[in-house]
């Protein structure tokens, strides 16, 4: 019996001890939870404060984009690079002191639907311009600093040479040196080293500081582009340009170009001499439309009165209309043509020589009536 009571006493004491330990553990967990909750609240409060300060700072920044008020003052030249987008242009203008901030220009860029029309190049600008004014200035072609050159159709290399020298400030000798380095110009092999006819006549615009080589390269590239647009095979390019140059120098009206082309091809097909005054004039460089008797006797492969076939090279820079006629001549049997009125450009054609003589007489009568110096 005593043992039973002792065992019961021991068991009771153990249970009390375990209850006490559990109570302590629960109390410890409650304290930890309270502390963790308190720490969490502190961290959350600090985080919220930091986030609020960040957002307030961001809002303050975006609401205070710097921009000038007026059209600006002073002068500065800026360069807009090829492929530049709004952000690139904004950085360029800001670095040059044109706009107060890149953000102001970017905002103006997105507000203007014409922004993508800005062309690369050199521009005259003012400093301290309102961003929207700076954008409008870049859209105005009058503010671009460009070098422009216009070459009319039918001009030979001497004309190109002097025009390029005038544009660039280079000497005629320097331009000639650039012309001689045809490999650097990208002149195709089929040109046989001659630039004549391969410099496309047009109006070109260049940036300041352009060199003769750059101008000549651009003109050769344009000629190839035009030939390619008419599907002219590389092996046919030289012949097409040569025929086109003859058309350019002989035709007065666009409507005559395909007909004159047909006369040239018809004569070539039967090995008949072309007998064109324009090829003789290419050698003699004299004034007037007609070659004199002395000129007709000149010893030159360009004298188509003395030689059959085409001249060795083109005799001028043909325009696109003449190239188109050389590629697509009229379907005729004409072997002769003559311009019977040098003022209007009226031209008559013939298959038979007798008819051509009658047309030529009509020209002689016009020349006599108008006392043209070309009658000599």
Image (spheres, helix red, strand yellow):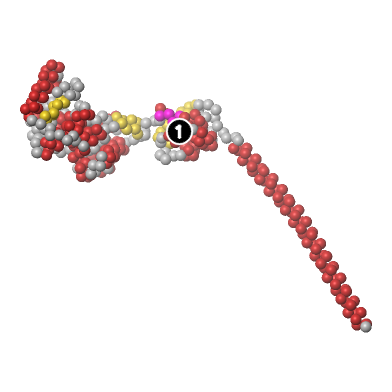
Residue lying furthest right in this view?
2
Q: How far across and down, in percent of the image, does residue 249 sit?
A: 19, 30
The range drawn in magenta is 137-141
Is 187 positioned to the left or the right of 98 in the image?
Answer: left
Q: How far across and down, in percent of the image, does residue 31 sit?
A: 79, 59
Residue ID at (22%, 29%): 254
Q: Is residue 70 magenta?
A: no
Is 134 positioned to the left or the right of 221 in the image?
Answer: right
Image quadrant in which you'd find residue 277? top left
Of helix, strand and loop, which mostly describes the magenta segment? helix
Image quadrant in which you'd find residue 303? top left
Residue ID at (82%, 65%): 24
Viewer-nearest residue: 75 or 266 = 266
* Residue with the mark numbered 1: 114
- Report crowding for label 1: few under 14, some 14 to 19, many 20 or more residues within 10 A (C-alpha): few
Residue ID at (67%, 43%): 52
Q: How far across and down, in percent of the image, does residue 90 sit?
A: 49, 37
Judging from the image, what secondary structure is the residue with disc 1 in?
loop
Res. 338 in view: yes
Viewer-nearest residue: 137 or 127 = 137
Q: How far across and down, in percent of the image, does residue 8 sit?
A: 89, 77
Query: Which quarter of the image is occupied by the C terminus?
Result: top left
């Amino acid at each position: 019996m005593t043992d039973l009571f002792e065992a019961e006493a021991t068991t009771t004491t153990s249970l009390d001890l375990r209850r006490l330990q559990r109570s302590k553990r629960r109390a410890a967990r409650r304290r930890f939870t309270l502390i963790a909750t308190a720490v969490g609240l502190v961290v959350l409060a600090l985080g919220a404060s930091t986030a609020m300060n960040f957002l307030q700072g961001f809002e303050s920044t975006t609401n205070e984009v710097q921009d000038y008020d007026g059209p600006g003052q002073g002068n500065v030249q800026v360069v807009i690079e090829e492929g530049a987008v709004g952000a690139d242009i904004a950085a360029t203008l800001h670095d040059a002191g044109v706009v107060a901030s890149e953000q102001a220009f970017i905002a103006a860029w997105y507000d203007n639907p014409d922004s993508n029309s800005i062309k690369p190049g050199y521009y005259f600008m003012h400093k301290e311009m309102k961003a929207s004014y700076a954008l409008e200035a870049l859209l105005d072609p009058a503010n671009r600093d460009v070098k422009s050159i216009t070459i009319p159709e039918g001009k030979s290399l001497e004309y190109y040479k002097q025009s390029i020298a005038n544009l660039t400030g280079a000497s005629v000798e320097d331009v000639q040196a650039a012309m001689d380095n045809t490999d650097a110009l990208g002149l195709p092999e089929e040109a046989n080293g001659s630039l004549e006819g391969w410099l496309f006549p047009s109006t070109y615009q260049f940036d300041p500081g352009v060199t003769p080589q750059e101008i000549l390269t651009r003109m050769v590239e344009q000629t190839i582009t035009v030939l390619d647009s008419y599907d002219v095979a590389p092996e046919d390019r030289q012949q097409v340009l040569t025929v086109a140059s003859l058309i350019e120098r002989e035709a007065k009206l666009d409507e005559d170009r395909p007909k004159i082309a047909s006369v040239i091809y018809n004569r070539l097909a039967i090995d008949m001499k072309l007998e064109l005054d324009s090829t003789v004039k290419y050698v003699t460089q004299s004034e007037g439309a007609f070659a004199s008797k002395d000129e007709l006797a000149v010893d030159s492969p360009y004298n188509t009165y003395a030689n059959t076939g085409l001249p060795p090279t083109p005799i001028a820079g043909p325009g696109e209309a003449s190239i188109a006629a050389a590629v697509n001549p009229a379907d005729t049997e004409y072997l002769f043509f003559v311009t019977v009125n040098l003022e209007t450009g009226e031209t008559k054609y013939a298959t038979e020589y007798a008819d051509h003589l009658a047309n030529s007489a009509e020209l002689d009568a016009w020349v006599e009536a108008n006392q043209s110096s070309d009658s000599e």
